[in-house]
Image (spheres, grey):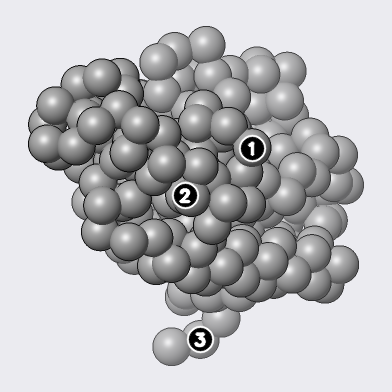
Amino acid sequence: MGEASREPIQILICDDHRVLTDTLVSIVEQDPELHLITPPLHTAEEGVEAVRRSHPDVVLMDVEFHGDMNGIEATRQIKEQDPDTVVVIMTAEEDDRLLLAAVEAGASGFLKKTEGVDEFLDAVKAAAAGEVLIDRAALTRLLARVAREREDRVQAQRKLDRLTPRERAVLDLSVQGVRNEEIARQLFISQETVQTHIRNLLRKLGVHSKLEAVAFAIRQGIGSG
């Protein structure tokens, strides 16, 4: 199939900054390789619904909206219902936590709202072609953050694995908000023994208080089920 007969890339814009979206519309409308499937949408919920109906090739998604759903959650829902749709996050500034959350939600890349017209067009076409839109420096930081967080999870699990079954039971009940007196009653031990178990688990987890131990456990997903 020749270049001239190629179908335009179907674009959906979802952003509540109307000055920006008006500018993006004018850019898209001037390029015959791009086609806007609907006027820009201004809530994440509208974006998810529009993808369900129209199945665009590329969604340009903002992060923060005034509604209940943000762009990260919208991206996750879009990718769940339509894996072939490419979602590009539009952002004013790079935030490593945002980058990581967006990648985990299924975003294919990021587009700075300060990009020029040519860079914007090139990025949209690259995304439609399956390219990943993230600069090398950001990718390096992101990979380093993922590696650090993975190592932190491994180290945290090693600490939890050092707990005896009874210490783990005390920790589990503490996460549930159970007081020491009730822990003693449920485990058929004395309150003094509960205190001993708490001192031991604090030492093994490398924390300084019961509250800190509970926070540590919650971060590792204990009690979330």
Mark 3 in CB contact with mark 1 (< 8 angstroms): no
Q: Is residue 113 above or below residue 15?
A: below
Residue at the image position 41 percent from the left and 34 percent from the top: 195
- How far apart marks 2 and 1 lie (CA) works out to 10 Å
What residue is shown at x 73% (from left), y 50% (from top)? 96
Q: Where does the image place residue 129, in percent across and percent down from the top left?
A: 54, 74
Q: CA distance from mark 3 to mark 1?
A: 68 Å
Please, what secondary structure does the residue beneath circle 3 have? loop
In the rendered image, the vertical position of residue 24 relative to residue 116, given as above or below: above
Q: Position of residue 198 (x, y in %)?
A: 44, 40
Residue lying furthest top:
66
Q: Secondary structure at mark 2?
A: helix
| For residue 109, above or below residue 35 | below
| Residue 224 shows in this picture | no
Look at the picture and state if 146 lies above or below 46.
Answer: below
Residues tagged 2 and 1 counted as in contact (Cβ below 8 A): no
The numbered mark at residue 208 is 1
Q: Which residue is mark 2?
A: 201
Dot in front, 3 or 1? 1
The residue nearer to you, when weighing 14 against 167, is: 167
Ranked by sequence position, the earlier of labels 3 and 1 is 3
Q: Is residue 133 left or right of residue 150?
A: right
Q: Which quadrant of the rendered structure holds the C terminus?
A: top left
Give the quarter of the image for residue 108. Answer: bottom right
The front one of 76 and 214 is 214
Residue sitting at x 12%, y 31%: 186
Which image quarter is the N terminus in? bottom left
Q: Which residue is mark 3?
A: 2
Of marks 2 and 3, the one in the foreground: 2
Q: Label 2, label 3: how many angstroms apart (C-alpha)?
A: 68 Å
